[in-house]
Amino acid sequence: MTEVKVVDLTKRYGRIVALDRVSIDIHDGEYVSIIGPSGCGKTTFIKCLAGIVSPTEGEIYFDGKLMNDLPSEERGIGYVFQETALFPHMDVWDNVTYGPRVKGWSRDRTRRTARELLDLIKLMAREDAYPQELSGGARQKTGVARALASGSNLIFFDEPLGALDAKVRAGLRYEIRNLVRDLGLTAIHITHDQEEAMSIADRVVVMKAGRFVEIGTPYELYTRPRTIFGANFVGEANFLEGTVAKVSENSSVIDGGEGMVLESSETSISEGERAVAAIRPEYVSMEKKDGGEGICGYVETWDFEGSTTRYEVTLREHGHFAVRVPHLPSSPAFSMGDEVVLRVPPERVLLYPYPEEGLQRELDLEGKG
């Protein structure tokens, strides 16, 4: 296994800052996924680690050894791209054994390694098939096996499943994760698919404009994101602006104006300060208006999503609010135009200081983080 340490890594292209002093420690055997909007620097980061791109500043260490001036072929890594780029004139066996043969491994060691990998990815029966004869999933698994065949303990995945259809992608991501775990490897996985990252990673890094905005376990990033951008980018959230009207020992009251009042179990923001409340759609209960307390609005649209229905509720003076209701026997049905009341448990209301540059600027996927 391999431990990775990155210190203040920076990459500039003229005035463009692709990476802005990012740092991280990745432990032996850890599976880390990196997500973020297009152009945020994900691929630049992994290419710097792989030696494909030279950083402007900063340091990269593998197992305590400085890698900055070491060429890619001497870093002991495996790299799997979105496009598998298999040799079209070679069958599966020859593609997988190419690296060991170039390195001069013995025939017995090469055969043993290839058979173990092909058995793990369940492609032994297709060892004589050429890339054009394989499905997209089988080609990508062959690419993974080829990357691992040279004995790398550190493997990089750069959007490895992006070119596959949803059904194949969902199954293959778990196969890759299990393979990495079974072989005891350290992995860094770049993806634009949040669900993919959250389902397989030990930790997830959220990037924005060349910076690491948040690093945490999937559970931490979803339930307790530390930033407004993280709450917005990972999953879906509603955002409401207001002023902290009261702070007690265990809760805060946020006044959004026009009768909008929320209670949060967070107490870190002082009375009188502006704040932003973030609420996941599935944490909201919705009932037809009956005169009780809550956030009032009316159903504008709804979308069937399989196990849930997502309702778009218009709040007077406060825009739209998403509510996700599970399909259970006890779940009520709502129609467009229904007047409803929304209620949110205080422990499900995340609270953040109001950003200096405004809420929309903070939510902007392309803006500076």
Image: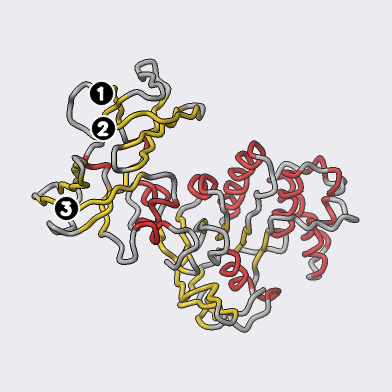
- Of the 4 image quadrants, the one containing the C terminus is bottom left
Name the outermost residue toward the left: 248
Q: Residue 73: x, y in percent?
A: 71, 74
Where is 49 relative to 237, above or below?
A: below
- Work out whether residue 38 can be spotted: yes
Task: Tell which tag, 1 or 3, sits nearer the viewer.
Answer: 1
Where is 24 relative to 350, above or below?
A: below
Identified at 34% across, 57% down, the residue is 359
- Quickly name the residue at label 1: 289
- Quickly name the residue at label 2: 296
How packed mark 1 is, by other alpha carbons closer than 10 Å (few <14, some 14-19, many 20 or more), is some
Task: Indicate the amino acid at tag 1.
Answer: Lys
Q: CA distance from mark 3 to mark 2?
A: 20 Å
Circle on res. 317:
none
Q: CA distance from mark 1 to mark 3?
A: 26 Å
Relative to 210, is 254 on the left or the right? left
How packed mark 3 is, by other alpha carbons closer than 10 Å (few <14, some 14-19, many 20 or more), is many
Where is 17 relative to 99, above or below?
A: below
- The kind of secondary structure element at disc 1 is loop
Identified at 51% across, 58% down, the residue is 36
Q: Are marks 1 and 2 in contact (CB under 8 Å)?
A: yes
Task: Indicate the amino acid at tag 2.
Answer: Cys
- The kind of secondary structure element at disc 3 is strand
- The kind of secondary structure element at disc 2 is strand
- Of the 4 image quadrants, the one containing the N terminus is bottom right
Relative to 354, is 24 on the left or the right? right
Circle on res. 244:
3
